[in-house]
Image: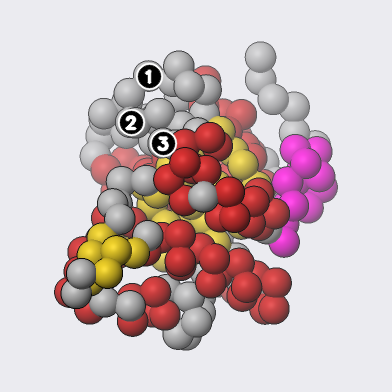
Amino acid sequence: METQINSHYNYGEVIIWLEKKGVALYGNHFKILDSDHPIIFKLIAYFLKDESTCNQFNIDLNKGIMVSGPVGCGKTALMNLMKHLTPIAHKFSVKPCRDISFEFIKEGYEIIHKYSKSAPKTICFDDLGTENNLKYFGNECNVMAEILLSRYDLFISRKLQTHITTNLSASEIEHAYGNRVRSRMRSTLNLIAFDKDTKDKR
């Protein structure tokens, strides 16, 4: 059933534009499926800052976005597309969590500072859960947990937003990062979730 949108934006035209952008970025095989429209409508509403539609979907524009779903459902591709839809004042970058873990191995604890308090900006941490606890000079560190806790403090003090994509469920997030991180993610992120049975589109 098609989601009903009451908005001054034409969401059908936005989806057509996004699909064309997706083809340009990823090739002719890229397609936005009708079954994904409910998820994409929420993302469009959020990133266009369409307040009335966000209210309809119970999305808080002050918080960031966490897109969750099974491997291959298109989370990363959609967030890369949303970068092109977002007004300049709300631009963000997409950073794979695995890349951050490799940076930590090379550079150590400065990496936590780099992605939190050093020149803070909106970031989408892609594929949360694919990195591992890492050791730097023999000291083990849950790098993403520390970054997310630091960014929570910046959300409270400066309204700094964080976005996340992940394959993990809420219980898996708690197991990997602890109850403290899960609690803070709940208070700083809107959850937009693909159905767990969504097929791999790769």
Q: Quadrant of the C terminus?
A: top left
The amino acid marked with disc number 3 is: Asn
Circle 2/circle 3 CB separation < 8 Å = no
For this view, does 180 lie left or right of residue 112? right
> Disc 1 versus disc 2: distance between alpha carbons?
7 Å
Q: Which residue is mark 2?
A: 72
Q: Spot the residue most to the bottom.
A: 119
Taken as a whole, is the magenta stretch helix, strand or loop?
A: loop
Q: Find residue 88 and report its image quarter.
A: bottom right
Q: Quadrant of the N terminus?
A: top right
Q: Position of residue 113 (x, y in %)?
A: 42, 80
Callout 3 secondary element: loop
Callout 2 secondary element: loop
How many numbered badges does the structure rendering display? 3
Residue numbers of the magenta segment: 48-62
Q: Is residue 136 magenta?
A: no
The amino acid marked with disc number 2 is: Gly
Q: Residue at x 66, y 20 (%)?
A: 2
Crowd around label 2: few <14 · some 14–19 · many ≥20 (10 Å) = some
Circle 1/circle 2 CB separation < 8 Å = yes
Q: Earlier in the sequence, mark 3 or mark 1?
A: 3
Q: Which residue is mark 3?
A: 167
Q: Find residue 160 and report its image quarter.
A: bottom right
> Disc 2 versus disc 3: distance between alpha carbons?
9 Å
Closest to the camera, between mark 2 and mark 3, is: 3
Q: Which residue is mark 1?
A: 199
Q: Position of residue 96 (x, y in %)?
A: 32, 56
* Of the pair 199 and 189, the residue shown nearer to us: 189
Circle 3/circle 1 CB separation < 8 Å = no
Q: Residue at x 69, y 78 (%)?
A: 157
Closest to the camera, between mark 3 and mark 1, is: 3
